[in-house]
Image: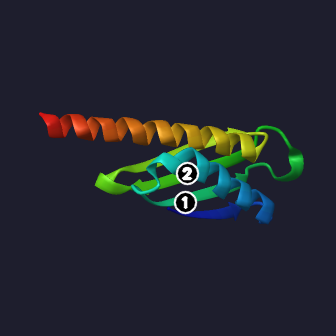
Amino acid sequence: MNIVVSFQDRSPSERLALYARTALAQALDRFDDRIRDVMVRIRDENGPKGGLDQHCSLAVRADAGIELHLHDTDSSPEAALRRLGGRAARMIRERLARLRQRRRR
């Protein structure tokens, strides 16, 4: 699984990029052999003003044509990334289950 992290409207942070790669790798570890790549974009919507303005986007491409595009906003990009990882894992699990159900019919 290839995880690429990019920053928009904020200075790049290797610490945050490492956190994003680690958190998403842990959340999606179960599907490592099925996920091709994960694109993460972290953006500060208001600049240094503070508040709920850390926007994170996640694009996941997996086998069987599964593509997910998820977004979350929080005052902390780490919190948004944790939620996105959990949501992505749940959605992949559900889509793979639906594919298995279709094959059984």
- Residue 7 percent coordinates (x, y): 70, 62
Disc 1: which residue: 39
Given contact means CB atoms under 8 Å apart, are the residues at marks 2 and 1 in contact? yes
Identity, as a three-letter code, of the amino acid under mark 1? Met
Disc 2: which residue: 58
Packing grade of label 2 (10 A; few <14, some 14-19, many >=20) is many
Residue 20 position by quadrant = bottom right
- Residue 16 percent coordinates (x, y): 76, 57
Evaluate whether residue 99 shows in this view.
Answer: yes
Q: In this view of the protein, which residue sits in the foreground, 43 or 66?
A: 66
Q: Is residue 36 left or right of residue 80?
A: left
Q: In this view of the protein, which residue sits in the foreground, 30 or 13?
A: 30
SS for dot 1: strand
Query: What's the residue at 60%, 48% (across, down)?
Result: 26
**Residue found at the very far right of the displayed protein:** 49
Does residue 101 lie above or below 61 as drawn?
above
- Residue 80 percent coordinates (x, y): 68, 41
Closer to the chain start, of discs 2 and 1, is 1
> In which quadrant will I find the C terminus?
top left
Residue 52 position by quadrant = top right
**Residue found at the very far left of the displayed protein:** 105
Identity, as a three-letter code, of the amino acid under mark 2? Leu
Query: What's the residue at 15%, 36% (across, down)?
Result: 104
Evaluate whether residue 13 shows in this view.
Answer: no
- Residue 46 percent coordinates (x, y): 79, 49
